[in-house]
Amino acid sequence: MTNFTKIKKVSPPGAGAQECGENVCIVRGRETACQGKGVSPGIVIGRAYVYDNLLTAVPQYRIAAEAVEGECERFLKAVRETSRQFDLLWEQAKGVLEDDPVSYLFDVYRHMLNGSRLLRGVRERIKNDLINAEAAVQTEINLIADAFTAMDDAYIASRLEDVRGVGRRLIRNLMGDAQENFSQLPENAVILARDLSAADTALLDPKKVAAFATMTGSPQSHTGLLARSLGIPAVVAAPNLLTSARTGDIVIIDGAYGKIIICPSQEEVDRYRKYRADFLRWKRSLKRLRRLPSVTSDGVYVSLKGNIDLPTEVEILVQTGVDGIGLLRSEYMFMNRNDLPSEDEQFEILKEMTGRMEGKPVTFRTFDVGGDKCPTFLNTSSTPNPALGVRGIRYALRFPELLATQFAAVLRVAAYADVRVLLPMVCSVEEVVSAREIFNRVADRLRAAGTPIGERVPLGVMIEIPSAALNASVLARHCDFMSIGTNDLIQYALAVDRTDAAVSSLFNPLHPAVLKLIKMTADAAREANIPLCVCGEMAANVRYAPVLLGLGVRELSMPAANVAMVKERIRSLRMSDMENYANGLLSLPSSTDVINRVNGFEAENR
Ligand code: PEP
Ligand code: MG
């Protein structure tokens, strides 16, 4: 079997398969192969750019005695800038209860930036050790953290992340533009990193970054999702990645199979050139599907929409011929910046984006911050278990002004375009009721001010927590549409952290409990007569399309790269057969039984 056939059978296509422009120079005898987990398919032969953020992110150097005063002044400037940023954040985040932990956090930050041990310690270190300010901050933060840890007190330990958070922000402000933003990469670079956060990934320019691989991470993390959205072939969880790689080495990345070959032999390069050509040929063959309707062979229409993480993706999405945007993850648009986006700014971005969608509907999800998505301007990481902490709608309801700003921007855009609002991480009816109250209040305020708004903007609920799926029939009475976020639904139903490589093999979309939760939600939507979409990664996988259709789903939203392939699959299916197929799966007792049945079905029907 050729590699091409394997890709077609089991993996969605990526956007990229590229190669170094220059002649590939093979260093004999240094070839090293690493195995990780493929998260975004595509084959790349490029030049390594090693980014060891643990070791090199903070510059360390000695300074001359005469430079001490200037260095202390540079440090104080960063302290002032950091305080200014916190004040700004606090101004915009007011409305929180007095005793709210988030408001308390701001007090802690202010204290740390105001004559605390941290400030004194850094200045003394610059003077006595003659080192640069970034290194001095790093050293002091480590010392404070060690002292906290030694106290062996749970409360003090929980403040550790606050200390580190302030330290990180200080260092970032000290480094200014010098911080790594991957803007100086050579063409066709392959980033090999210890770790890339979702925010790092959002910064990557697909025109320059041909692929990336990391030592840590898991396929379900937002880093993986972003790679797929950007069409950048990527591999995560390759523990030996940085052992032998050097910047400038030739490297092969196979984003479908998780393979990385550093300094490949000529034979390997030739082999992967062939795979890449096959892959590209197959991708081109999918283009013809753009103009064909997404209907099953017995005439049932299945609406296909796109997931958008960054505004730049809209251009590619429009070319796939989708029915609209089913999930616009608004948090990514504002990930790498130091302040909160204003209502006008969000209005402009959204208006521009909806304009490019040729009148098709756009589903705007309000900020889903928390978990593994932490915009720079919000400190959401200082919680013991981010996935179970203040995330999504919880965060939004603690910062009602932030939510109101987003609602206002959407309501204003709705005067010109078909936009809907989607609330993430809903767990209970009360959250929807509270959000709707804010929504109505914002609409009243805009109307009273004579601002043009859309009069019938649908408000939707994401079903991504098991309690929401179990209670979907009640939630359905309080919202205008629902959207199943399978990434989180699986994470929470199976208690599998989607960012933890150690448990990623347990992340199973075909677990009987997951299928039941989807079925319950689909039944609830049908009974309430409201639209239902699936916008998690399950919707993007051709293996799961027959299952989802059979469970009653008629709308799927996915990254642009997967649309053609899913459409091709839908056109080959008979809806009446899918219902029987899904009912059969629901009757099976274990994951193994379901997986075996699905494997059998795929073998017979593909
Ligand atoms: C999901 O959870 O499936 C989803 C679509 O939301 P996100 O991946 O952004 O958490
Ligand atoms: Mg989610």
Image (cartoon, helix red, strand yellow):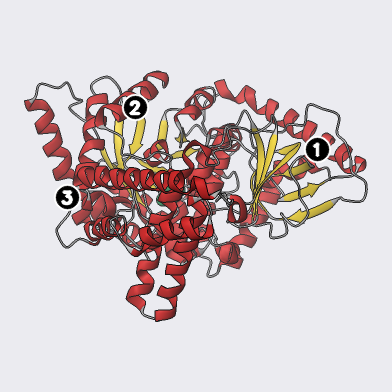
Is the N terminus in the top left, top right, bottom left or bottom right quadrant?
A: top right
Which residue was labeled with disc 2? 350
Q: Is residue 86 above or below residue 120?
A: above
Look at label 3 and name its amino acid: Ser
Is label 2 in contact with label 1 (beta carbons under 8 Å)?
A: no
Where does residue 455 sit, x and y in percent of width and height? 17, 27
Mark 2 packing: few (<14 Cα in 10 Å), some, or many (20+)?
A: many
- Mark 1, residues whose alpha carbon is within 10 Å: few (<14), some, or many (≥20)? many
The answer for how far apart the CA atoms under marks 3 and 2 are is 24 Å
Q: Determine the residue positioned at 23% across, 36% down.
A: 405
Say which element carries label 2.
helix
Q: Please tell me whether residue 144 is drawn above or below residue 172 in the rendered image.
A: below
Residue 468 at x, y percent in the picture: 31, 57
Estimate the x, y position of residue 164 in percent, counting from the top left.
42, 60
Residue under pointer 3:
434
In three-dimensional space, the C-alpha distance between marks 1 and 3, rounded to whole angstroms, equals 53 Å
User: Which residue has dot 1 on it?
Assistant: 275
Q: Quadrant of residue 103?
A: bottom left
Q: Which mark is residue 341?
A: none
Q: Using the rendered image of the protein, determine whether residue 384 is visible from the camera's viewpoint.
A: no
